[in-house]
């Protein structure tokens, strides 16, 4: 447990929000003067943004919340690997905003924020409109560093899809898997840390192998990894062997896994050691915080957004909170579950700040399930607190599924994988 | 993950607590005692902090603990004492589970008690 005392906490809280206190005066007065006058704009309708919008309204129906999201439907990255495996349809991973609008009174605008004016506390939209806010929540997910791999670009992603934002890219990768001949090699290029969904590329390998085993059993999945270790590694390696034999091969960075260049015409992937000819290439490029976060001076020189670990208020721009994959959230991974947990803490902190109160102690949780096969699930979990070192994992808690668990355990975790998806999507968009 | 047959688990839990005198130090202060300025890690969390903790449960157990039909049980309607027993048994590892054994270890006994009380009182 943390050795931080309550007094320390108040001190940190005071220091962290000292700059903001003057700024809150108008907001707090507005909130006191008449309910409904405190305004929050949320950018992004994904796991972070949609959760934050809903929970702001649940915690204080007097706060006016506007959610700006370009798409009228949100397609989740979680379970998009199951679409590739043939276990799910795109429809089943698509969620609308009706409940947020009608049930929770969120003003949802399908538009794009093109500029943030943190000093003037307003955002500009693509449509030309401007929205004023008392607090802004930025949850734009990730963007790609296409130019870090020679020959790769946004255009090249039409031939070698990343499928790391669910939607047309998922459908494209699926169509390429369906079109390939039996006996081909599917290359998955996995990036170095940090990136969205650390176990994602490896769940994908299993799901693609599941599809291939059923339809193209002479084919192979080759993971070219920029890293030498990955999330739930032991469990994945054991599971792959057990379910797919030698169908999946993982090449760590030190043994030639680092992808340097691609040739989209010849369908060749160049690593530090070898050239690999592939039938399908799924290239997951290195990532940064979402475009709007970078353009608005919210990110550091590495491209991610430093935040106060208690309130998720930006360390770069006061009055702006950054949650989800874009933020640097200490020990928390860039996962959907973590984004939603961060969003809940951020919403509670904003409501407290509007009332002139010190935000309550945060508690953050992550649980990431991965399917190796339809009846073979594994997980990693963690419980997190805010200490003097930022967001840290509670020692002795969390961790991965046991190594030598019986088949029934894996089957139960596969059931809970599906249960988790149902619950979290209903908790966010329901 | 069931509340059936509470008697054996009750007995087991009592034995477990008796065998672990350290647990007594984690016992929460009575609710009437004001929190000391320098709060010990096992002090009861504030109501707002408990609400923060509980809100994370909703990602699997559904908003306000009402889980969509399926394999994950709802928290709504659960009794506080039985919930606390389960949580403590998850924490000690006495009760088998997939992720709950790993989650429950992330909280002090005082926090588990506060969460169980929240579930019993607020999630109907």
Image (cartoon, coloured by chain):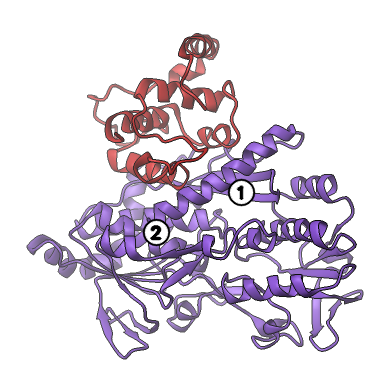
Q: Nearer the viewer, residue A170 or A202?
A: A170
In the rendered structure, the residue with mark 1 lies on which chain?
A
Tag 2 near tag 1, CB within 8 Å:
no
Of all residues, the one furthest to the left in this rendering is: A33
- Mark 1, residues whose alpha carbon is within 10 Å: few (<14), some, or many (≥20)? many
Percent of width and height locating residue A336: 52, 58
- Mark 2, residues whose alpha carbon is within 10 Å: few (<14), some, or many (≥20)? many
Of all residues, the one furthest to the front in this rendering is: A215
Q: What shade does chain A have?
A: purple
Q: Which chain is red?
A: B
**Pointer 1 residue:** A369
Percent of width and height locating residue A258: 81, 71
Helix, strand or loop at disc 2? helix
Mark sitting earlier along the chain (2/1): 1
Q: Nearer the viewer, residue A268 or B104?
A: A268
Q: Residue at x 53, y 9 (%)?
A: B15
**Pointer 2 residue:** A429
* Residue A113 seen in the figure: yes
Which quadrant of the view contains residue B16?
top right
Whether residue A353 sits left or right of residue B109 in the image: it is: left
Q: Residue at x 59, y 35 (%)?
A: A396
Of all residues, the one furthest to the bottom in this rendering is: A128
Q: Which mark is residue A151?
A: none
Percent of width and height locating residue B11: 50, 8
Q: Residue at x 80, y 79 (%)?
A: A260
Q: Nearer the viewer, residue A231 or A372?
A: A372
């Amino acid at each position: 447990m943390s050795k931080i005392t309550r007094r320390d906490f108040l001190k940190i809280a005071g220091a962290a929000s000292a700059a903001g206190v003057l700024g809150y005066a108008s907001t707090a007065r507005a909130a006191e003067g008449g309910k409904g006058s405190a305004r929050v704009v949320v950018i992004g309708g994904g796991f972070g943004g949609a959760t934050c919008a809903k929970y702001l309204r649940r915690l204080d129906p007097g706060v006016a919340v506007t959610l700006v999201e370009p798409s009228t439907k949100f397609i989740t990255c979680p379970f998009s690997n199951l679409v590739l495996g043939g276990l799910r349809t795109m429809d089943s991973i698509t969620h609308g905003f009706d409940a947020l609008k009608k049930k929770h009174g969120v003003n949802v605008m399908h538009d794009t924020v093109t500029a943030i004016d943190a000093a003037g506390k307003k955002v500009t939209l693509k449509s030309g409109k401007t929205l004023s806010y008392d607090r802004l929540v930025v949850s734009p997910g990730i963007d790609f560093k296409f130019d870090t791999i020679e020959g790769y670009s946004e255009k090249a992603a039409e031939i070698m899809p990343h499928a790391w934002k669910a939607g047309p890219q998922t459908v494209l990768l699926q169509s390429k898997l369906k079109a390939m001949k039996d006996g081909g090699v599917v290359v998955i290029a996995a990036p170095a840390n940090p990136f969205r969904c650390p176990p994602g590329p490896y769940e994908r390998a299993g799901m693609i192998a599941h599809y291939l085993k059923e339809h193209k059993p002479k084919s192979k999945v080759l993971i070219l990894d920029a890293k030498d270790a990955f999330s739930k590694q032991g469990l994945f390696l054991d599971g792959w062997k057990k379910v797919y034999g030698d169908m999946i091969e993982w090449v760590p960075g030190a043994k030639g896994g680092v992808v340097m260049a691609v040739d989209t015409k010849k369908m060749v992937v160049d690593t530090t050691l070898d050239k690999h000819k592939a039938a399908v290439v799924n290239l997951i490029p290195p990532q940064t915080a979402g475009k709007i976060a970078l353009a608005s001076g919210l990110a550091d020189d590495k491209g991610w957004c430093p935040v106060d670990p208690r309130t998720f208020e930006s360390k770069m721009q006061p009055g702006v909170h950054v949650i989800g994959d874009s933020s640097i959230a200490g020990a928390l991974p860039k996962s959907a579950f973590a984004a939603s947990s961060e969003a809940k803490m951020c919403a509670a902190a904003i409501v407290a700040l509007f009332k002139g109160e010190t935000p309550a102690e945060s508690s953050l949780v992550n649980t990431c399930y991965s399917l190796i096969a339809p009846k073979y699930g594994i997980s990693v979990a963690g419980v997190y607190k805010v200490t003097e070192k930022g967001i840290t994992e509670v020692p002795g808690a969390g961790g991965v599924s046991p190594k030598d668990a019986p088949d029934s355990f894996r089957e139960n975790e596969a059931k809970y994988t599906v249960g988790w998806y149902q619950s979290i999507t209903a908790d966010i968009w329901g | 993950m069931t509340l059936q047959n509470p008697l054996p688990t009750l007995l087991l839990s009592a034995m477990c607590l008796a065998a672990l005198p350290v647990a007594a130090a984690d016992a929460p202060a009575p609710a009437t005692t004001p929190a000391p300025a320098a709060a010990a890690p096992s002090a009861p969390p504030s109501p707002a902090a408990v609400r923060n903790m509980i809100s994370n449960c909703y990602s699997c157990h559904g908003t306000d603990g009402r889980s969509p039909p399926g394999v994950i049980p709802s928290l709504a309607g659960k009794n506080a004492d039985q919930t606390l027993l389960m949580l403590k048994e998850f924490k000690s590892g006495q009760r088998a589970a997939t992720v709950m054994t790993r989650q429950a270890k992330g909280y002090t006994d005082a926090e588990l008690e506060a969460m169980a009380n929240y579930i019993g009182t607020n999630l109907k």
